[in-house]
Image: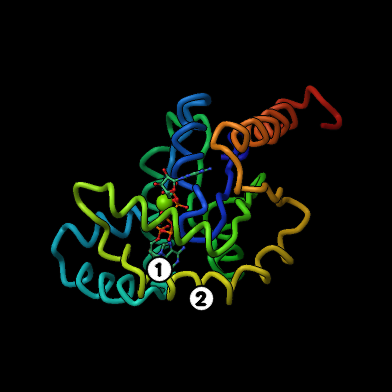
Amino acid sequence: MAEIPIIWILGGPGCGKGTQCAKIVEKYGFTHLSSGDLLRNEVASGSDKGRQLQAVMSSGGLVSNEEVLSLLNDAVNRAKGGSKGFLIDGYPREKTQGVAFEERIGPADLALYFDCSEDTMLKRILARAAAAAVKRSDDNEETIRARLQTFKQNTSAILELYADKTLTINAERDVDDIFQEVVQAIDCVLKKKAKIAAHC
Ligand code: AP5
Ligand code: MG
């Protein structure tokens, strides 16, 4: 694991985590693991556990880390043989999640934090919901506001703890402008991993 990059993708609901991850996958062929998608897969399975997860997700709160980390750990183990790198999207959402991840899976090389105003995030999710053939059950205004609140409560502690490996990116811009900055940061991590640049 130490030779391939692990990148945490942080930011509030609707800031563009999934959008940027899709572009990173296209360019670098990394493995994209979204904690939200893994949880939604579990919900879709119709299991009892899925029903409990659904209740928490519909409230805009956080699922227990035991559940999320175990889903992530399984997914990393399934993919790690052939993976060029991991994008861990939507994790950590609490600083204790970051600590548990690094103990169980491995150290993150970089955290990209997409900084966006609440107003923009709300508008983006409402637009996504309006355009979707199948709307996410948490993409309604009441739950979005609760998700924003959960995000606000936890994020500064994560940014403080991981300040030395976090790049904050202004996510209020065009998707491609944001991506240019993402590319610079990832290229730098790849160079450091390959030990071909002392500084970037
Ligand atoms: P999760 O699925 O991660 O949802 P989220 O964090 O609320 O974020 P979204 O997926 O809604 O938005 P995004 O940032 O990916 O934006 P996107 O690219 O889609 O989590 C859901 C729930 O699962 C949580 O609330 C929680 O309950 C649970 N959960 C997940 N992780 C957990 C964890 N670690 N611990 C505990 N519980 C956890 O973009 C949004 C829209 O904007 C799109 O339409 C897109 O086209 C558009 N857009 C994107 N970028 C731009 C741009 N630059 N300009 C204009 N439009 C843009
Ligand atoms: Mg997403």
95 left or right of 72? right
* Residue 55 to residue 71: above or below: below
Q: Amino acid at mark 1?
A: Ile
Q: Are marks 2 and 1 in contact (CB under 8 Å)?
A: no
**Quadrant assignment, res 194:** top right
> Left or right: 16 with respect to 155?
left
Q: CA distance from mark 2 to mark 1?
A: 9 Å
Q: Is residue 16 above or below residue 120?
A: above
Report the disc number at residue 132: none
Rendered-image quadrant of the C terminus? top right
**Residue bearing the label numbered 1:** 144
Q: Position of residue 16 (x, y in %)?
A: 49, 48
- Residue in the image at 51% along x and 43% along y: 87
SS category of the residue bearing label 2: helix
Q: Label 2: how many residues lie within 10 Å, few (<14), some (14-19) or many (20+)?
A: some
Q: Which residue is mark 2?
A: 149
Q: Which of pointers 2 and 1 lies earlier in the amino acid sequence?
A: 1
Residue 39 higher or lower than 131, as above or below: below
Q: Nearer the viewer, residue 56 or 59?
A: 59
Q: In this rendering, is residue 181 above or below 7? A: above
Image coords of residue 171 (percent x, y): 60, 48
> Which one is nearer the viewer's eye here, 116 or 182?
116
Q: Kindly tell me whether mark 1's CB lies below 8 Å from ligand 1.
A: yes
Report the colour scheme: rainbow
- State the residue in front, 10 or 120: 120
Task: Tell me which amino acid carries mark 2.
Answer: Gln
For this view, does 121 lie left or right of residue 135? right
Residue found at x 56% / y 40% = 1
For label 1, the SS is helix
Q: Tag 1: Cα neighbours inside 10 Å, few (<14), some, or many (≥20)?
A: many
Residue visible at 25% across and 54% down?
Answer: 41
